[in-house]
Image (cartoon, coloured by chain):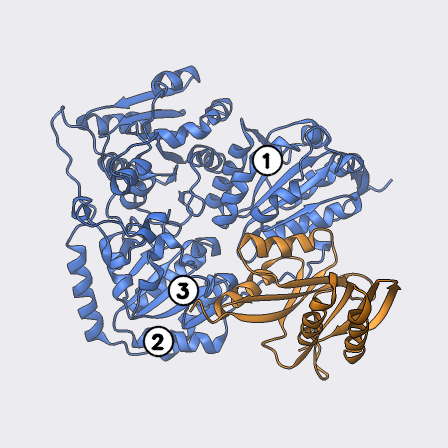
Chain colours: A blue, B orange
């Protein structure tokens, strides 16, 4: 018998190993027992046992986003697969390359409402980049390898492979990745040279330009981020990054205006509104970024570079679309730029920077931290101190979703891509803790901090069990204001301060919770304790939960209210009191 | 901008595999696009490809989105916008049933003759006609039959192809 004959389950695990997969995140069950048996019998692929399948997917996302590799998940049929759906949708929205293997009932039972049967390919069709139901073991090797190609190429995304139990048992021939042909799915990588020339001309002639840099840049790789940084430097133009794009160019660059969008900086948003040439690089004009679409950057010519043709002209009509991989297109632009060495309008650019510096001087992120023991800790202060005390070492940050997420984006600065993991598109509460675990698995010796809110972190708190089992030294840094803060803020702003169901009652004592898992729990309640608690957290070798008890009613500012334009950005909520929210704005999320 | 709604006929060539129609239809419903009609059948000799003919409507920006979103689906080989790409022929096939008696019955038969519809079933007080042709021709036939006892319609939906030598998979 040829050595390439093996069971379907063994084919799956061998394909994973041949694709360079070192670790997978999963949870066993009846329909994946053959796969678990195959895992047991080898040691090329390591398995991390999670506590809930949603956690497994977020871990794989954290792993993927911090390494640039494809994350792999293994779950059982029925509830295993349906529990994974939130994570898959999150990965689709944020373009994270994932493979999710799901067990399925044997082929002869499909459609019979069998025990733990769900129409997995039906359910996951709209929340994956592609999915497969493998009914014949002969198709399995090519499906496995094609899935990896699809997940990671073009605009990355999650791919589900549904594996009926009889196919896992069936014997078949293994084929290596090098022998599998790709079909017609071939994303365009290099940009159209004519459009690139036009874009360079437009950029060179700009009087009030801005680079608008998104997560696509980071997905394109570190080299692409370096190329974008070089172009920004070469032109001397200002740049802003989206929530997903933080770290694509170094925050220490004087040309960086901070994050833009709903809770972006005053200077970034006004620059977007007032620019005459916008260079969108791997960004998708999301509604959090654009604000009111018909008032978005009204006077500008727009260049849009993206690998996904469907992102172009979706929300905002652009003047020069360039389809291609950011790395390739920006290198092409750099070549053209260097060959032509165009003369830019120095006078106009100088005036533009004068204006930008004026906006910067507003210091839109300012807050007041009292220093007496009676004063409460401001959440911004806690995050700022965390940044100051960790910036000199390689640190990976994940977040949950809400106010703390926006403060983390505003106050934690990134010099490198792939160090910031947050749920941007879907806004999944409960993302940060499992994502941090995935990051820690990929980088066992590095500092990984989940900047959390007490509300969000409770959504996947069961993953403390995973942290404990593998003794992963993740630091869970809870900004605890005992409110679902962003909900509370919107209720204050839009619903007359009627705080319906937004109070976090029934919280655990986080120190005792940590201790019950054999971890370290720390708490700060006064401003002068912040530094020492952070220092203690950093000194503790194992996992730590920090309960940072902060002021309860702090709002996240600046803010562009729903349905407003960039130039209607609010620096404080009081200035909004007299206005009433437009009805169009009220219905927006 | 909301007013410039255009009707477009798309010919989508796809891999003939399970779930591909669900992907296409799900894309339209999930993103709120219109489907006016849709037909699908295998068209290659080896049954490896199917052709989906879909009639949709939207603003030019939405039509561009529909095409880009369709092209993003892995089993989609290519998307052709016949409306945008030049002259093409649209054809539809329908069966209609009318029940009537006396002079109305004769009138129905006379109109069917004018439109070159065929009688494919006759009973004492009913006819089934079949007719094919452009959507405009079909519409006017239906309009006339509506007053003559039309009780049921089965329509194929539009199929379309480019005029002349041009093919969708080699231009």
Residue A436 in which image quadrant: top left
Residue A488 in which image quadrant: top left
Tag on residue A316?
3
Q: Earlier in the sequence, mark 2 or mark 1?
A: 1
Between A178 and A149, the one nearer to me in the picture: A149
Residue under mark 2: which chain is it in?
A: A
CB atoms at circles 1 and 3 under 8 Å apart?
A: no
Q: Is residue A163 left or right of residue A237?
A: right
Identify residue for label 1.
Answer: A82
Residue in view at x 29 percent, y 41 percent: A490
Residue in view at x 42 percent, y 42 percent: A427
Measuring from the top left, give residue A496's x and y in whole percent: 25, 38
Same chain under badges 2 and 1? The reply is: yes
CB atoms at circles 2 and 1 under 8 Å apart?
A: no
Q: Is residue A295 left or right of residue B13?
A: left
Q: Is residue A581 left or right of residue A448?
A: left
Q: Earlier in the sequence, mark 1 or mark 3?
A: 1
């Amino acid at each position: 018998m040829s050595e390439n004959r093996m069971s379907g389950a063994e084919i799956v695990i061998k394909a994973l190993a041949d694709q360079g997969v070192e670790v997978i995140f999963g949870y066993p069950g009846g329909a994946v027992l053959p796969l678990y048996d195959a895992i047991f019998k080898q040691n090329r692929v390591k398995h991390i046992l999670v506590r809930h399948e949603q956690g497994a997917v977020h871990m794989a996302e954290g792993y993927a986003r911090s390494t640039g590799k494809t994350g792999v998940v293994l779950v059982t049929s029925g509830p295993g697969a349906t529990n994974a759906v939130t994570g898959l949708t999150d990965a689709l929205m944020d373009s994270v390359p994932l493979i999710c293997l799901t067990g399925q009932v044997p082929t002869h039972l499909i459609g019979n409402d069998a025990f733990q049967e769900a129409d997995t390919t039906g359910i996951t069709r709209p929340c994956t980049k592609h999915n497969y139901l493998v009914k014949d073991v002969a198709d399995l090797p090519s499906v496995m390898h094609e899935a990896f190609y699809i997940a990671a190429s073009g605009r990355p995304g999650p791919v589900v492979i549904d594996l009926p139990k009889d196919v896992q048992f069936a014997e078949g021939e293994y084929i290596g990745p090098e022998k599998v042909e790709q079909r017609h799915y071939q994303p365009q990588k290099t940009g159209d040279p004519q459009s690139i020339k036009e874009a360079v001309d437009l950029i060179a002639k700009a009087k009030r330009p801005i680079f608008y840099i998104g997560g696509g840049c980071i997905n394109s790789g570190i080299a692409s981020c370096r190329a974008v940084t070089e172009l920004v430097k070469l032109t001397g133009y200002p740049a802003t990054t989206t929530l997903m794009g933080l770290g694509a160019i170094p925050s220490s660059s004087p040309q960086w205006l901070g994050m833009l969008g709903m809770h972006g900086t005053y200077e970034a948003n006004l620059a977007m509104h007032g620019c005459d040439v916008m260079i969108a690089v791997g960004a998708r004009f999301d509604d959090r970024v654009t604000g009111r679409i018909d008032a978005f950057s009204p006077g500008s010519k727009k260049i849009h570079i993206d690998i996904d043709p469907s992102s172009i002209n979706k929300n905002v009509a652009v003047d020069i679309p360039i389809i291609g991989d950011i790395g390739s297109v920006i290198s092409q632009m750099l070549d053209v730029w260097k060959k032509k060495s165009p003369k830019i309008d120095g006078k106009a650019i100088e005036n533009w920077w004068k204006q930008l510096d004026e906006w910067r001087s507003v210091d839109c992120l300012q807050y007041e931290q009292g220093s007496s023991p009676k004063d409460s800790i401001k959440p911004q202060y806690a995050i700022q101190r965390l940044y100051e005390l960790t910036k000199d070492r390689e640190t990976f940050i994940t977040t949950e979703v809400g106010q703390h997420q926006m403060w983390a984006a505003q106050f934690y600065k990134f010099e490198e891509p792939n160090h910031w993991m947050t749920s941007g598109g879907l806004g999944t509460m409960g993302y940060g803790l499992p994502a941090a675990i995935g990051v820690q698995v990929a980088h066992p010796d590095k500092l990984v901090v989940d900047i959390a809110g007490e509300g969000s972190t409770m959504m996947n708190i069961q993953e403390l069990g995973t942290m404990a089992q593998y003794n992963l030294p993740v630091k869970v840094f809870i900004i605890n204001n005992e409110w679902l803060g962003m909900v509370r803020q919107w209720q204050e702003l839009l619903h007359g301060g009627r705080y319906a169901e937004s109070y976090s009652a029934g919280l655990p004592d986080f120190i005792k919770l940590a201790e019950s898992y054999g971890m370290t729990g720390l708490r700060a309640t006064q401003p002068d304790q912040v530094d020492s608690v952070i220092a203690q957290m950093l000194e503790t070798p194992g996992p730590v939960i920090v309960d940072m008890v902060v002021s309860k009613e702090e709002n996240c500012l600046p803010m562009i209210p729903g349905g407003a334009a960039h130039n209607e950005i609010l620096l404080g909520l009081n200035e909004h009191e007299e206005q009433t929210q437009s009805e169009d704005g009220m219905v927006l999320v | 901008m909301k007013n410039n709604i255009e009707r477009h006929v798309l010919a989508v060539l796809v891999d003939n595999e399970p779930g591909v129609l669900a992907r296409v239809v799900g894309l339209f419903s999930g993103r709120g696009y219109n489907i006016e009609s849709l037909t699908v059948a295998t068209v290659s000799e080896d049954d490896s490809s199917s052709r989906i003919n879909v009639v949709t409507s939207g603003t030019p920006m939405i039509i561009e989105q529909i095409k880009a979103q369709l092209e993003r689906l892995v089993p989609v080989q290519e998307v052709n916008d016949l409306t945008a790409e030049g002259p093409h022929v649209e054809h539809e096939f329908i069966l209609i049933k009318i029940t009537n008696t006396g002079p109305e019955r004769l009138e129905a038969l006379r109109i069917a003759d004018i439109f070159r519809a065929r009688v494919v079933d006759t009973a004492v007080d009913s006819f089934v006609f079949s007719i094919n042709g452009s959507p405009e021709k079909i519409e006017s036939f239906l309009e006339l039959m509506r007053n003559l006892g039309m009780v049921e319609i089965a329509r194929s939906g539009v199929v379309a192809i480019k005029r002349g030598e041009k093919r969708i998979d080699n231009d």
